Structures are given as structure tokens and as C-alpha cells.
Image (cartoon, rainbow, N blue to C red):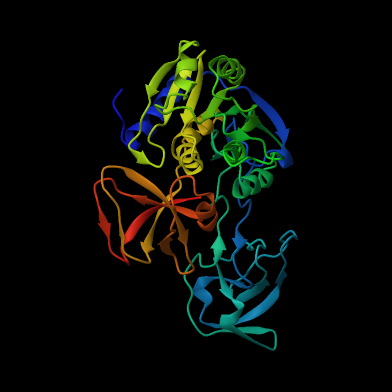
Amino acid sequence: MAALSFADARRTVIDRVREGLGPIPTETLRLDDTAGRVLAQAIHADRDYPPEARSMRDGFAVRSADVPGQLQLAGEIRAGQPCTLALQPGQAIEIMTGATVPPGADAVVMVEHTRTEDHRVIFDRPIETGANVNPQGCDARSGDEVLPGGVRLQFAETALLASVGAAYVNVYRQPRVAILATGDELVELDSHPLPHQIRNSNSWSLALQVARAGALPRVLPVAGDDLEATIDLLGDGLGADLLLISGGVSAGKYDMVELALKSFDASFHFDRVLIQPGQPCVFGTARGKFFFGLPGNPASTMVCFETLARAAVELLSGLSEPFLPLTWARLAVNFRHKPGLTRFLPARLQAGGTLLPVKWSGSGDLAALGRANAWLVADPERAEYAAGELIQVLLR
């Protein structure tokens, strides 16, 4: 099977999951239980927003044709109280931010731009019609769709839902993701590893990545380098909505995963991606479920999940469009790499927005990953970057 570029591999994941995606179950939850969930319904405005013209500033409601000049102070309107005043020519009404603009007024002059003397307000400059006024319905009209289905509910979306009175909302069920680490060298967290052993870190980093992507992780027992044991655990994992397998996917003598998957009539959509770390990344289908075979070195596992598997998790969560948090930053130092692969290398975004590559000894260097807070993304067709140049960054 030919190796895919990073862009082609990501597109393959998204296309395959979308093609195989059936109806996702939903549930109705109170708004305070929906943080991070994906909305399964469109939300509509229950009235105009704002329901009346509102002042954007503390100041004075006026007719724009009356200023500059001196106007008679005719009262006060506070936020949170009904408006019982109407503005007459030659008058100004003191008004607070968020208060209803009275009939007859077409602008609000900020208090900083006025002087008050003997119940008269002095305006030294003209003002445009509509200045500092939010007209009725300028945010949304009653019945307008204000939030589509398929979006993740973060703090801004939650504020919007609360503002339109959506106390209960319909959200997609969170997918269940099984996580299976493989390898005789792995021992559990509370073990004291011998020199030839390592603690299983990948399952726990993946569990956090899965939860951050909006799914429910389930960590399976470690599968040793034994074919029958691997088959049994794979069968258990394929009962979830998605299976993530860490390790055992390369061409080593004791890498059992691909062989074990054949017993489930697995089909493979790709088995190599032109990235570093993470080239021997596998994506396929078995028993009607999607699975990823992620390389076992920690950085490889992390990168392959964030750039490829996370898209599958987000689609299974009901998200309309998977999101890859790429941005740009200026390099703090010169950088070079061997072209041919898209490289995701540990780096640190510094104060001021510059990006500093983190020195590391390879994809098993967890200490270096701990010093990083982002991934530098090196273009496969470009070998050198000068300090001060822009380079892509994958936020972490």
C-alpha cells in the first residue's frame, strides 16, 4: 500500500468516516451539563435581540439634528427598567449602558463628550444618526437561527443558549473510544519497571486526548506480544465506536497488530503516512468499526491522534467539521530539516509570539515533550527557514 501525504491521509480519514457514519444517538440535557458536547439541533431566537433599541454607552439620548448645542435635561433612563419617557425636540435624556433608547431619540452622546450646567446639557460636537445605539433586532430577529446543529458547546455558545432561554438542549451522544496499548515491554503505572521495561504512558495520554476531543475513553489492559491475547483484546476494543491501538503496527518480528486484525477481516485504508513522527500509522475498518494503529513511541502516538484520529472522534461526536488548530508563528532561530516528510516537532511558543524548536532525542523523549507547548510543522517541500520567518504551528 502506497504511503499517503499528510493532507491525503487526513482527507481519507474524514471522507471514510463520513461515508460510514450512521445516525448518531442524541440525548436532552440541562444546559449546565452540556459543556463540550456537540449540539444536535438548530437553536432559534425566541424574540428580537435586542428586543428594543439599546444604548451602547453611558451618556445622553438625543436627536442628532439637535447637536451641537444646549439641550434641556428631561430625565434619566436606567438599564433594567421600562422606558416611560419620550424625547422631545430640544431635550436630552440621561441614559445608561444597556437601557432602552426612548422614542424620539436617534443617537446617544457619550457622557465624556458633554458638560452639564443648570439642568442643561452642552454638546460641543455633532453626532451621526444611530451613533452608540444598538437597533432592535440588530443581533437577531425572532425566529432566526442563531446556532446550527453540529457545533461544540463552549463558553460563547453556552452564553448564547442561556440568552435565548434554552434551558434544555439536544446533544449528540459521546462516542466510546477503546484504547489498547501493546508490547511486552509495557508495565502499569504503579509498577516498578525493570531496566528492559517501561511504564504504559500512551494509554493515559490518549485517554486525555480522547476526552478533550469530546469522547469517552476506555483503557484496555495491555496486550503483550502474543497473537491470541492480542486478538481477544482487539475483539473487546471493537465493541466501542472507535478503537485506538498504540504500538505493534510496524514491521517488526513481534508486531502482532496487523496480523491479529486480519482475523476480523479488517480492511486497511492506509498503513503509512509521510509524516514524522508517526510514519507507520494505520487506519482501517473491522467489524463495521473504525480503528487506528498508532506507532508506539509517545510523540508518534500523540501526533497521529491529534492530526488524524482526532478528526474521526470529532465526526463520531456529531461535529460538522473537524478542526485542526494550525496557526503561524515567527521562528526565534534558524531551522532546517530533511524534506520529504511533513514534520511535527516539539516547540515552544514564547512571550511575544516567537516559536523556539525544543531540542529532543527522538519520538520517545517525553521530557522534551514536557518542555514544549506546541508542534512546529515543517513543510515537506522546504528544507530551510531563517530566524524571523513564519512557519506553521499546531497548537497543543
Q: In the image, what residue occupies the spot 32% across and 67% down? A: 388
Q: Closer to the camera, 183 or 52?
A: 183
Drawn side of residue 194 relative to residue 255, left or right: right
Q: Closer to the camera, 340 or 228?
A: 228
Vertical relation: 323 (above or below) 270: below
Q: In the image, what residue occupies the spot 70% across and 89% down? A: 118
Q: In the image, what residue occupies the spot 55% across and 28% down? A: 182
Vertical relation: 34 (above or below) 73: above
**Quarter of the image with the N terminus in it:** top left
Drawn side of residue 360 relative to residue 107, left or right: left
- The answer to which image quadrant residue 85 occupies is bottom right
Tell me if I can see residue 142 in this picture.
Answer: yes
Image coordinates of residue 275 in percent, x first then y, are: 36, 40
Drawn side of residue 385 relative to residue 67, left or right: left
Image coordinates of residue 78 in percent, x first then y, are: 72, 66
Tell me if I can see residue 212 in this picture.
Answer: no
Q: In the image, what residue occupies the spot 43% across and 20% down? A: 19
- The answer to which image quadrant residue 244 occupies is top right
Residue pushed farthest bottom? Answer: 117
Total count of labels: 0
Image coordinates of residue 201 in percent, x first then y, are: 60, 40
Q: Closer to the camera, 252 or 58?
A: 252
- The answer to which image quadrant residue 196 occupies is top right
